[in-house]
Amino acid sequence: MSIEQARFNMIEQQIRPWDVLDQGVLSLLAVVKREDFVPPEHRGMAFFDTEVPLGHGQVMLAPKVEGRYLQELDVHRHERVLEVGTGSGYMAALLSHKAREVVTVEIVPELAKTAIENLRRAAITNVSVLQGDASKGLPTPGPFDVIVLSGSVASVPRPLLDELKVGGRLIAIVGQEPVMRATLVTRVGDQEFRHVELFDTVAPRLVGFGEPSRFAF
């Protein structure tokens, strides 16, 4: 099977059936080359319906989860996006085509370095990869229109919610195994947040976000 046929099958057999019907999102997934963000030893898994190991206990989320993330966030071209958990840089690459600017924070130095190189090769210039521990504070100031947590948390950290603009959205996989849910939180006022549980899934913990925060939403 050719790479392009595998990509087509991923979109049509995995992502679209998961209620990802936004044609802009589907087209973006066809354009950004997922295989270029997969470690060479796992290149054969690039289009599988599963997480892809990145080393250091981290993974790329399954393609259908990435697709749902993009659809639910509905990022616009004027918006500034924060991602926590860069991984290989793939989600940042997808977001870069939707947003004005993407700031992505990775705690593992080796992964941050790999992501920088992957994004450079993809000729993406509106993503800043910062190495640091976002659970201890952001290395760049907010506010942000969109915040993406590319991994799971025990609860949504209130300090990250505070970095959202009013009208801003945060998406994260929240809970404890075996029950986790992708959750979209929208800031509807200075101290008001609306949260919607989207779908059940499971993902590895973001490093530093293991236990419920006393600031939890």
Image (tube, rainbow, N blue to C red):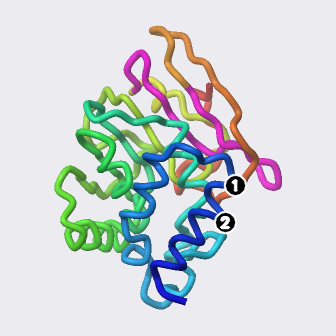
What is the quadrant of residue 65 in the picture? Answer: bottom right
Q: Amino acid at mark 1?
A: Pro
Residue 99 lies, in percent from the top left, at: 30, 40
Mark 1–mark 2 contact, CB under 8 Å?
A: yes
Query: What is the C-alpha distance between the residues marked 1 and 2?
Result: 6 Å
**Residue for point 30% across, 49% down:** 97
Quarter-wise, where is residue 33 in the image? bottom left
Residue 160's spot in the image, x, y percent?
46, 32
Report the residue at 40% width, 36% height from top: 75
Depicted 190 relative to depicted 130: above or below: above
For the residue pair 117 and 13, the one nearer the viewer reads as 13
Q: Label 2: state its secondary structure.
A: helix
Q: Is residue 204 left or right of residue 71?
A: right
Q: Main secondary structure of the magenta part?
A: strand
In the rendered image, the quadrant that contains the N terminus is: bottom right
Q: Which residues are magenta?
A: 164-185
Q: Is residue 31 above or below residue 138?
A: below
- Viewer-proximal residue among 38 and 139: 38
Q: Which residue position holds label 2?
A: 13
Image disc number at residue 88: none
Q: Residue at x 82, y 55 (%)?
A: 178
Q: Which residue is mark 1?
A: 17
For the residue marked with disc 2, what is the amino acid?
A: Gln
Magenta-span inclusion, residue 182: yes
